[in-house]
Structures are given as C-alpha cells and as structure tokens.
Amino acid sequence: MHWKEMEEKNEYAKLIEEIKQKYAMESSALQEFNQQEKEKLLIKVEQDKLEKLEKQKEQMDLLEIERQEMKDMMESIEKKFESEKVVFMEKTNQLITKLNEERATQALTIEREKSARKKCDRLEEEIKHLQMSKRVTETIVQHEKNPKSNTQATETSKLTDTSNTVQIPEQNKQPNISGPSPQRLPCYDGKTEWKPYYMQFIHFSNRYRWDSKQRLDRLVECLRDKALTFYSTRPPSV
C-alpha cells in the first residue's frame, strides 16, 4: 500500500514536471513568437519608414528635376534676352547713327543752301554793280568823247563849275506844281554822306519824271569824276 502511494506520488510529480516543461516550452515558444512578431512589427515599421523616405526622395528628385528644368528654362530665356538685347542695341545704335548722319547731312545741306543763296545774292549784287559800273563808265566815256553833242542833247542841262550845280532841263519840268520848284541840283562833293544826296537826286528825278537813261546821265553829271569811283566802291546796301 505504501509502495503504491509512493508510485502514485512519483507519477504525479512526473506529470507535474512534464506540465512545467510543457509550460516552459510554451512560454519559450510564446516569447519567441512575440519576439518574432515584434521583429516583424519593427521590420514593418522600418519598411514603412523606408517607403516614406523613398517617396520623399522621389518627391525631392522630382522637385530637383523641376528646379533644374526651371533653371535651364530661365538660363535659356536669359540667353535669348541677352542675344535679343544685343541685336536690339545694335539696331538702335545703327538707327541713332543713321539719324545723326541724316541730321548732319540735312544741316550741311541747309548750310550749303544758305551759302549758295548768299553767293547768289552776292553775285547778283556784283552783277548789278558791274552793270552799273559799265553803264557809268560808258556814259562818262561818251561825255568825254562828245561833250558838245551831249550838251545839245540835254539842251539846258549844264555843268556849271563856278556854281558847282546841275541845271534841270525845262522840258522835263512838271507843270503847275504847287510849292517851291528847285531848279538846280548841287553836284556831289564827296565830303558829305552819299545817301541823303542820293535821296534828293531821286526826289528830283521823280519830280521831273526822268527815265532810266536821263537819270544815269544826270547822276554822272552830278557826280562828275567821282561817278566811277563811287560805283566801284559803294556798299551793296546803297
């Protein structure tokens, strides 16, 4: 009986030991499982992080590509702008140069036209001066060659050395003129100003209605030997 109890106790102890071993094995397996799950979870977390990082990297790469494309586009635009700017500035400078040349040409043309007009005016004055000098010279020569015939042609127009005056011909007088009628025009002595004397001569010539030939003849008589000298040296404005 005692032996049987001891055997039962041994069996019971053996069972308990098996249970403990089984529990220990299960606990170990559970721990191992938990560790594996934990590791799996960590791996998954790491994978998620890695995926996120990869996505972020992809996004960064895309942003970098876009930034580079934008940079390239800006550089291309800048180069194009600089190229067009150079062309525009060259055209602008050419246009400015052309306008300046045209202005200079216009100014030169205007200056030449002014100079040409002045030359033409001066030539006209010289021609008139030469023509008048020629007429005065011819009249003086004619008076010197034919003093008697000239005296008869002018009838009562006489050179009076004693009175230093020129008598006005009677047939050229204007009849019935009211007021004083001067009959004699003093000869020009060259000591006084010419213009007042000339205006007085014009007044006489208009009063007695002399034609151009008569005016020239009378003027030569009034100027005497000073006629050619005066017309050769007179200013164009007189």
Image (cartoon, rainbow, N blue to C red):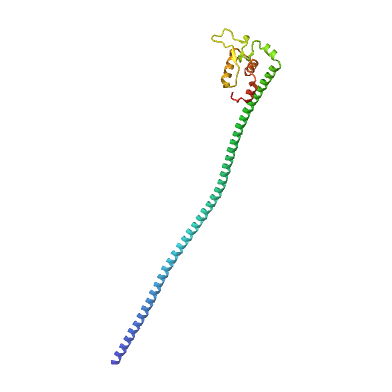
Is residue 188 left or right of 146 when viewed as pictured?
left
Depicted 109 relative to depicted 60: above or below: above
Residue with the most extreme right position:
145
Percent position of residue 86, x then y: 56, 48
Query: Is residue 33 or residue 84 the one in the foreground?
Result: 84
Outermost residue, top side: 176
Q: Nearer the viewer, residue 67 or 120?
A: 120
Q: Quadrant of residue 34?
A: bottom left
Position of the N terminus, as image quadrant, is bottom left
Quadrant placement of the C terminus: top right
Classify residue 33 by image quadrant: bottom left
Residue at 67% across, 12% down: 151
Give the image location of residue 170, x and y in percent.
62, 9
Front-lying residue, 12 or 98: 98
User: Going 59% across and 38% down the picture, which residue do you hit?
Assistant: 104
Compared with 196, 65 (above or below) is: below
Percent from the top left, x then y, of residue 143? 68, 17
